[in-house]
Amino acid sequence: MLACAAGRVAHADTPELVVLGGRGAPGATVRVAIVLSGDTSSAGVSADADIRFSTDLLEFVEPVSAHCRVAARLAATHQLGGTLIEPGVLSLALFVGNLQVTALGDGELASCDFHILSEAGFGTVPLTLDFVGLGGARGAELAVVGVPGAIVIGSATPPCVGDCDGDASVTIDEIIRGVGIALDEFAASVCLPFDRNGDQQVSVPELVEGVKASLTGCPAAR
């Protein structure tokens, strides 16, 4: 699998829609990505996700067209729509944008910008999934598993390379996320601490630094 989350149950043959949250300080804007993983047959052509978040800590401002976007790799073939169906629930729909039906393929599908409220304290804000859907070429509903994510509210500078959530450690899940960025499956923004030089890519040396931090610990935590 290209994306992992703590406590997940493995669904070896079922595609996953994964929420990948970012990290930011109170008052900052954080990018949240929706990623398709495990669609080995490239059967999915459309996707839906209802993301629930805490309105005490986060804010999403409509319209969706101003604060969400289709992944660059799908911009020529798909469109994104959505709305806040109730306070704290963002409903997104990704669909084919022309007469040619094109598979979504594994990787990032879309992303949205969430604002961390200035009065929010440090901590982790869950991004749960009330609903996920994956559509096939003939309108069939395909099996799909939703994997929730989180936004981490913390200091502006993470302690070490690969520490996606800023908890002063690098986990196996975070290493896998870095590998996904290196393979162009995810955008660098899903784990900015891996992109040490800011070139929107993850290089082999950056991966090595992340693995070293995973084995020996982050400098701030030693």
Image (tube, rainbow, N blue to C red):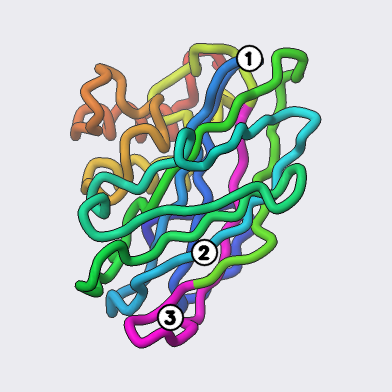
What distance separates the C-alpha of mark 3 from that of mark 1? 40 Å
Asked which secondary structure carries label 2, the reply is strand
Which residue is pictured at 32% across the width and 79% down the height?
Answer: 43
Task: Please say if 53 is above or below 163.
Answer: below
* Gap in angstroms between the C-alphas marked 2 and 1: 28 Å
Q: Quadrant of the N terminus?
A: bottom left
Of callouts 3 and 1, which one flags the residue occurring earlier in the amino acid sequence? 3
Numbered circle sitting on residue 13 = 3
Q: Is residue 168 covered in magenta?
A: no
| Label 3 vs label 1, nearer the camera | 1
Q: Give the percent coordinates (x, y) of residue 193.
A: 40, 25
Q: Position of residue 16 (x, y in %)?
A: 48, 66
What residue span does the magenta drawing correspond to? Answer: 134-152
Q: Relative to 106, does residue 52 appear above or below in the rendering?
A: above
- Which of the numbered marks, if any, corresponds to residue 18? none
Query: Going by the image, does 74 lie left or right of 79?
Result: left
